[in-house]
Amino acid sequence: MIKKLISISLFQLIFVINLNAQTDMADGLRSNGKIYVVVVVLATIFAGIFAFLVKLDRKISKLEKEKN
Amino acid sequence: MLFLLCHSAELFVRDTQKNLHLQKPDLLIMRLWWWKILGGTLLLYTVIAGFLLPVPRLDILNETIRNLYFHVPMWFTMLALFGAGAAYSVKYLSSGNLVDDIYAVQFTNAGIFFSILGMLTGMEWARYTWGSFWSNDPKQLGTALSMLTYFAYSILRGGIKDDEKKARIGAVYNIFAFCMMIPLIFILPRMVDSLHPGNGGNPAFSKYDLDSDMRLVFYPAVAGWMLLGFWIATLSVRTQLLHFELEQKDIHQKDIQ
């Protein structure tokens, strides 16, 4: 009886896992933490673009002040 | 909404900065920092939360559904920039001031830039979900037509030498191009079957965007990309204004000599 219960619950567990894994998602990347590498890389690129825009903005502001 | 925000900020600035004798409210908003920093923060949040927050598990789309945070805001930004450009074109026609024309051109150019980004990201996304870069989808075709009308705007302006004539014809054409874009992108593709979501009569995003997790990232992403688009556009506006004023000075000095 107990064996049967265990096997049923095991089956259910596997079934539930299968349900979740039906659609391929980047679960592996998330479980071993490598998704953070992607986030850090993208955040770095964005920070670089932002810094460039800030620099450009300040340069133009300076020119505008010099003109007056 | 952004326009309203800008407009209220403009009124606010007009009230509070009267004594600072800074020339124009438009110029003042372009020099303000808070909205640029807000846009940057929103985009940083988009990059982080866009990859870490959960998304619906859908077949075929899989993780590419996260493209919604990056591909779709390109079009929203393009729309806002083209709208601003068209508004300044109307303003130019009523004022005849060449400065308004500079605004119109630079906003429209930034809009064209974002439309190219939107088209490229859309084609890349389509390659892996719909099977090919180009599948003659009604929305793809409509957008391509709209982009061509805007490319023609640049070519048209480039072909006219006289500044006043260029500005006037450009402004009229720009308003026409904006009016053409609305049916080409927003109405016609919805009247036929399309691979894009929300077509065939339904408003867009109902399927994906209803997911509250995605809304949490999608709306900030749209606002952030729009602010970044306006920032880039205003930087080129300011450069062109400086250029224009230098030219005027040159003409003035030649007149004196």
Image: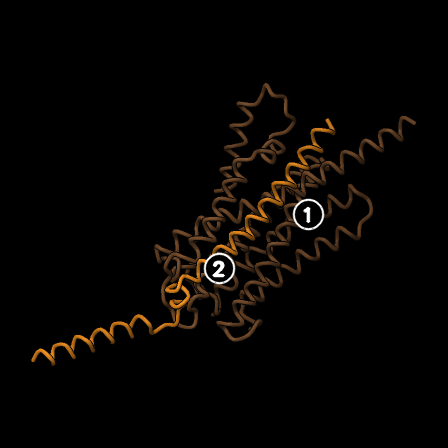
Residue at figure coordinates x 59%, y 58% from the top left: B117
Give me the disc on residue B172: 1
Q: Nearer the viewer, residue B78 or B87?
A: B78
Amino acid residing under circle 2? Val
Residue count near mark 2 (Cα–Cα under 10 Å), binned few <14, some 14–19, many ≥20: some
Instruction: From the image, state whether disc 1 or disc 2 is nearer to you.
Output: 2
Secondary structure found at label 1:
helix
Secondary structure found at label 2:
helix
Q: Nearer the viewer, residue A27 or B87?
A: A27
Q: Is the residue at mark 1 from the same chain as the one at mark 2?
A: no
Q: Position of residue B53 (x, y in %)?
A: 38, 56
Vertical arrangement, residue B135 with respect to residue B227, above or below: below
Q: Nearer the viewer, residue B134 or B101?
A: B134
Q: Nearer the viewer, residue A47 or A60?
A: A47
Amino acid residing under circle 1? Val
Q: Which residue is mark 2?
A: A38
Q: Quadrant of the C terminus of chain B?
A: top right
Q: Position of residue B140 (x, y in %)?
A: 56, 66
Vertical arrangement, residue B169 with respect to residue B91, above or below: below
Residue count near mark 1 (Cα–Cα under 10 Å), binned few <14, some 14–19, many ≥20: some
For the residues labelled 1 and 2, say whether their Cβ atoms are less than 8 Å apart.
Answer: no
Q: Position of residue A30 (x, y in %)?
A: 39, 63
Q: Chain in brown?
A: B
